[in-house]
Amino acid sequence: MNKSARLVTVLGLGFLGGFFVQRSLSHSPLSPEQALARVKASVKQVLTMDGAWIFLQKEPWTNGKLTYEVYKGGLTEKTKDNEIIHYDFIADAQTGTLLSFETQTHQ
Protein backbone atom coordinates (compact mmCIF):
# COMPACT_ATOMS: atom_id res chain seq x y z
CA MET A 1 0.00 0.00 0.00
CA ASN A 2 1.47 3.38 -0.93
CA LYS A 3 1.64 6.38 1.42
CA SER A 4 -1.42 8.16 0.05
CA ALA A 5 -3.57 5.02 0.34
CA ARG A 6 -2.41 4.53 3.94
CA LEU A 7 -3.16 8.15 4.72
CA VAL A 8 -6.68 7.85 3.28
CA THR A 9 -7.25 4.63 5.24
CA VAL A 10 -6.01 6.15 8.51
CA LEU A 11 -8.05 9.31 8.02
CA GLY A 12 -11.14 7.26 7.19
CA LEU A 13 -10.73 5.08 10.29
CA GLY A 14 -10.14 8.18 12.43
CA PHE A 15 -13.26 9.81 11.07
CA LEU A 16 -15.37 6.70 11.70
CA GLY A 17 -13.97 6.31 15.22
CA GLY A 18 -14.69 9.95 16.02
CA PHE A 19 -18.18 9.67 14.58
CA PHE A 20 -19.06 6.67 16.76
CA VAL A 21 -17.55 8.22 19.90
CA GLN A 22 -19.48 11.45 19.33
CA ARG A 23 -22.68 9.52 18.65
CA SER A 24 -22.37 7.50 21.86
CA LEU A 25 -21.61 10.62 23.90
CA SER A 26 -24.61 12.47 22.51
CA HIS A 27 -26.90 9.75 23.91
CA SER A 28 -25.49 10.05 27.43
CA PRO A 29 -27.90 11.38 30.02
CA LEU A 30 -27.38 14.89 31.35
CA SER A 31 -25.99 15.41 34.81
CA PRO A 32 -28.53 16.68 37.35
CA GLU A 33 -26.82 20.08 37.24
CA GLN A 34 -27.11 20.27 33.44
CA ALA A 35 -30.78 19.28 33.57
CA LEU A 36 -31.48 21.91 36.25
CA ALA A 37 -29.71 24.58 34.17
CA ARG A 38 -31.90 23.72 31.16
CA VAL A 39 -35.07 23.83 33.25
CA LYS A 40 -34.11 27.21 34.71
CA ALA A 41 -33.31 28.55 31.25
CA SER A 42 -36.69 27.42 29.91
CA VAL A 43 -38.72 29.16 32.64
CA LYS A 44 -36.66 32.27 33.30
CA GLN A 45 -38.75 34.33 30.87
CA VAL A 46 -41.94 33.74 32.86
CA LEU A 47 -40.73 33.34 36.47
CA THR A 48 -38.64 35.41 38.83
CA MET A 49 -36.76 32.53 40.40
CA ASP A 50 -35.69 32.76 44.01
CA GLY A 51 -34.33 29.22 44.35
CA ALA A 52 -34.01 25.84 42.67
CA TRP A 53 -33.17 22.26 43.59
CA ILE A 54 -33.00 18.84 41.92
CA PHE A 55 -32.79 15.23 43.10
CA LEU A 56 -29.43 13.76 42.08
CA GLN A 57 -30.80 10.34 41.11
CA LYS A 58 -32.68 9.61 37.89
CA GLU A 59 -35.86 7.59 38.13
CA PRO A 60 -38.35 6.09 35.68
CA TRP A 61 -41.50 8.13 35.05
CA THR A 62 -44.47 7.05 32.96
CA ASN A 63 -46.84 9.31 31.07
CA GLY A 64 -49.51 7.23 29.40
CA LYS A 65 -47.67 4.48 27.53
CA LEU A 66 -44.37 6.39 27.40
CA THR A 67 -41.67 5.82 30.00
CA TYR A 68 -38.81 8.25 30.55
CA GLU A 69 -35.73 8.42 32.75
CA VAL A 70 -36.23 11.71 34.59
CA TYR A 71 -34.92 14.06 37.21
CA LYS A 72 -37.38 15.59 39.66
CA GLY A 73 -36.90 18.93 41.33
CA GLY A 74 -38.41 22.24 42.23
CA LEU A 75 -38.24 25.97 41.75
CA THR A 76 -39.24 28.82 44.03
CA GLU A 77 -40.62 32.09 42.72
CA LYS A 78 -40.86 35.34 44.63
CA THR A 79 -43.60 37.55 43.17
CA LYS A 80 -43.66 41.35 43.09
CA ASP A 81 -45.94 41.18 46.15
CA ASN A 82 -43.27 39.13 47.99
CA GLU A 83 -45.44 36.02 47.77
CA ILE A 84 -43.46 32.76 47.64
CA ILE A 85 -44.69 30.13 45.17
CA HIS A 86 -43.16 26.65 44.95
CA TYR A 87 -43.19 24.59 41.76
CA ASP A 88 -42.38 20.92 41.15
CA PHE A 89 -40.92 19.81 37.84
CA ILE A 90 -40.04 16.62 36.03
CA ALA A 91 -37.31 16.87 33.38
CA ASP A 92 -36.18 14.32 30.82
CA ALA A 93 -32.71 13.06 31.84
CA GLN A 94 -31.52 12.83 28.21
CA THR A 95 -32.50 16.33 27.07
CA GLY A 96 -33.51 18.41 30.10
CA THR A 97 -36.90 19.02 28.49
CA LEU A 98 -39.67 19.83 30.96
CA LEU A 99 -42.21 17.02 30.99
CA SER A 100 -44.22 18.35 33.91
CA PHE A 101 -44.28 21.73 35.70
CA GLU A 102 -46.87 22.32 38.41
CA THR A 103 -47.51 24.57 41.37
CA GLN A 104 -47.03 22.72 44.64
CA THR A 105 -50.25 22.04 46.46
CA HIS A 106 -50.42 21.93 50.25
CA GLN A 107 -52.52 19.14 51.62
Image (spheres, rainbow, N blue to C red):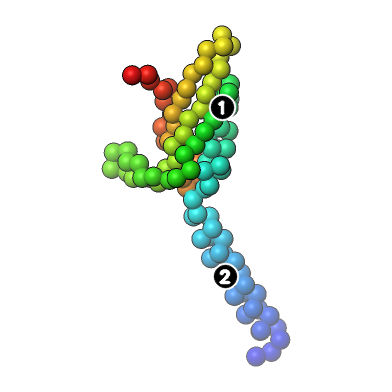
Residue placed at 58% from the left, 33% from the top? Answer: 41
Q: Nearer the viewer, residue 14 or 25?
A: 25
Q: Nearer the viewer, residue 13 or 106?
A: 106
Residue 27 in the image: state x and y as whole percent: 49, 55
Report x, y in % for residue 18.
59, 66
Q: Is residue 56 left or right of residue 7?
A: left
How dense is the environment of label 2, judged by Cα within 10 Å: few (below 14), some, or many (20 and up)?
few
Image quadrant in which you'd find residue 100: top left
Give me the residue at 56% from left, 17% from top: 78
In the picture provided, is 71 more to the left or to the right than 6?
Answer: left
* Amino acid type for the residue under numbered disc 1: Gly
Task: Please report whichever mark, 2 or 1, sits nearer to the chain's N-terminal start.
Answer: 2
Amino acid at pointer 2 = Leu
Q: Quadrant of the N terminus?
A: bottom right
* Residue pointed to by mark 1: 51
Residue 39 against residue 48 in the figure, above or below: below
Q: CA distance from mark 2 to mark 1?
A: 44 Å
Residue furthest right in the image:
3
Mark 2 lies on residue: 16
**107 displayed left or right of 42:** left
